[in-house]
Image: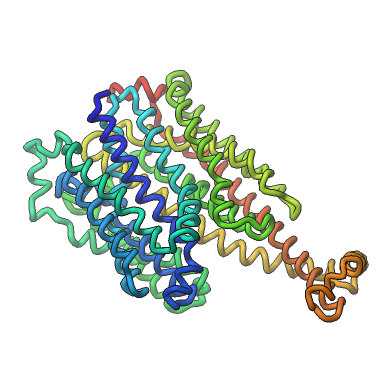
């Protein structure tokens, strides 16, 4: 491998990390931003919503833009716009401008991930495809864990604006390296590519319909829980627009000659099965990344930065395991590797499904390690298997669609689990109340024990709670809330376990090469 290859790989990883980290780095800074900008939680949530909507729109059509503008120009330009938008976010004087710049940042960021994947893939020969995907996968898996840690540290040390400003020097370096070393692929300069790039072939109708369908759908996922889902007239109206936009987009793309997204590729069981697997993988990755911090905050009472550090060992396990996938791919069928990955992820979720109110941070170590190894044996084979039958612009199209389905799966997972966590919590609390009421035998015994503990500690007098009975009732209520939350968390784990095991269905239906690292050379 030449120094140029290495520089391109490093540049691609930097660009991918910039995009992925920015999806989660904002979350820990939300309270600080609310106070500084003088806005409500509902209003500040648009900082994340705008980024995710724009990102989701661009991800599946990044290949189309790249083929029209030229990959080098598109990739370098996207890095430049992303960097400039990051600087503008850090300087934004008010919320409307911050949301606008986050929207621009999301549009530019959507180009970075699929293009980075393609650049890394092309630096390796076909027989080393699993190794290439392992390197790319490291950035995809480590990014979500680094976001909260980096965001927490920067916010506490330098203020919330630094979470955007940190992108500027990294973006400048990545942009310069991209301009100097990234080249356009051969198929962009072939004679047959000219008609595709012609002005008349620009599918503006498809782009408008995609923006409508995906934008509305992503809005529903981001805002549904806050707006009470379909009890809100605005959510219902936007859902109707999402359905109309999506169905019209599918109809339009299947009837024109040069579509913005080649949906005909979905006829292949490799692509359709890969899309299902990627969506499920997105749920598995982002669902636990969403639920575990809430559990840790409610039960273990860790800070945002401590919570982020909790995920680092699992991310490192993923990185180490990705180095094991390439040699394993030479010996075992992809179905064996994928089944092994599903099994490990299922075991990790099963371990978490037995957590209690006495669970500590140390109890999460091994489940997250097992999960980290399992993700490596899922991500690399899925990407490699879905890519192997394609080349050129079709390969870029498939790459963009796979990243799109992974992100949409993650959005669906987070939105669904957030809603279920709230509803399970309310129901579990109602189920517990008759059992822990001071008027029930079990509740009376628990109340008496709490009364003895508080009397011995003198807690009521020391903290000015007034009557000890008030403190006893509040302590009883706190235990009920804690127990109902743990019960809800355990129920969510069983749902995530079901989704994880459902991944075995396409694993055994999809067409796959017998050996990823060997057979890929024939395509």
Residue 492 percent coordinates (x, y): 62, 54
Query: Is residue 236 in view?
Result: no
Residue 204 percent coordinates (x, y): 18, 60
Task: State the residue at coordinates (13%, 39%).
Answer: 188
Q: Determine whether 295 is above or below 363 in the image.
A: below
Is 100 placed left or right of 333 in the picture? left
Task: State the residue at coordinates (45%, 21%).
Answer: 327
All told, the count of numbered labels is 0
Residue 222, picture quadrant? bottom left
Query: Is residue 194 in view?
Result: yes
Picture colour scheme: rainbow
The quadrant the N terminus occupies is top left
Task: State the residue at coordinates (58%, 46%).
Answer: 310
Is 363 placed left or right of 102 in the picture? right
Residue 296 percent coordinates (x, y): 64, 55
Viewer-side residue, 361 vs 51: 361
Viewer-side residue, 27 vs 516: 27
Viewer-side residue, 518 vs 506: 518
Viewer-side residue, 279 vs 488: 488
Residue 163, picture quadrant? bottom left
Q: Determine whether 199 is above or below 470 in the image.
A: above
The quadrant the C terminus occupies is top left
């Amino acid at each position: 491998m030449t120094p140029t290859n290495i520089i391109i790989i490093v540049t691609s990883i930097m660009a991918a990390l910039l995009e992925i980290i920015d999806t989660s780095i904002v979350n820990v800074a939300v309270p600080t931003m609310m106070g500084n900008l003088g806005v409500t939680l509902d209003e500040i949530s648009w900082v994340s919503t705008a980024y995710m909507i724009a990102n989701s729109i661009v991800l599946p059509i990044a290949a189309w833009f790249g083929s029209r503008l030229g990959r080098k120009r598109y990739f370098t330009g996207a890095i430049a716009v992303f960097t400039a938008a990051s600087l503008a976010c850090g300087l934004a004087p008010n919320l409307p401008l911050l949301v606008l710049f986050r929207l621009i940042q999301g549009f530019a960021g959507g180009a970075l991930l699929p293009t980075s994947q393609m650049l890394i893939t092309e630096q390796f020969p076909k027989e080393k495809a699993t190794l290439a995907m392992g390197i790319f996968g490291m950035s995809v898996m480590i990014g979500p864990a680094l976001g909260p840690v980096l965001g927490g540290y920067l916010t506490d040390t330098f203020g919330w604006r630094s979470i955007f400003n940190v992108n500027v020097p990294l973006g400048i370096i990545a942009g310069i390296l991209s301009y100097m070393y990234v080249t356009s692929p051969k198929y962009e300069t072939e004679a047959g590519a000219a008609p595709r790039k012609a002005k008349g072939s620009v599918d503006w109708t498809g782009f408008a319909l995609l923006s409508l369908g995906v934008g509305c759908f992503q809005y529903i996922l981001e805002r549904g829980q806050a707006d009470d889902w379909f009890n809100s007239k605005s959510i219902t109206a936007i859902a109707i627009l999402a359905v109309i936009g999506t169905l019209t987009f599918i109809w339009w793309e299947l009837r024109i000659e040069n579509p913005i997204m080649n949906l005909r590729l979905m006829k292949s069981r490799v692509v359709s099965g890969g899309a299902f697997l990627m969506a499920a993988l997105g749920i598995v990755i982002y669902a636990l990344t969403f639920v575990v911090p809430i559990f840790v905050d409610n039960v273990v009472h860790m800070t945002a930065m401590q919570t982020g550090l909790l995920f680092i060992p699992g991310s490192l396990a993923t990185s180490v395991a990705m180095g094991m996938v390439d040699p394993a791919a030479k010996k075992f069928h992809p179905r064996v590797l994928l089944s092994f990955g599903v099994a490990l992820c299922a075991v990790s979720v099963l371990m978490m499904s037995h957590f209690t109110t006495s669970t500590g941070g140390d109890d999460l170590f091994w489940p997250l390690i097992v999960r980290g190894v399992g993700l490596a044996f899922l991500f690399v084979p899925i990407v490699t298997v879905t890519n192997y039958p394609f080349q050129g612009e079709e390969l870029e199209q498939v790459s963009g669609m796979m990243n799109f389905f992974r992100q949409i799966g993650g959005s669906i997972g987070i939105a669904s689990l957030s809603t279920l966590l709230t509803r399970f919590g309310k129901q579990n609390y109602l189920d517990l109340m008759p059992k822990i009421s001071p008027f029930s035998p079990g509740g009376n015994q628990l109340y008496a024990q709490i009364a003895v503990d508080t009397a011995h500690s003198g807690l009521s007098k020391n903290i000015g709670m007034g009557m000890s009975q008030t403190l006893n009732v509040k302590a009883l209520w706190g235990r009920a809330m804690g127990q109902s939350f743990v019960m809800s968390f355990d129920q969510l784990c069983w749902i995530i376990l079901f989704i994880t095991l459902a991944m075995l269905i396409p694993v055994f239906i999809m067409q796959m090469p017998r050996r990823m690292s060997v057979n890929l050379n024939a395509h």
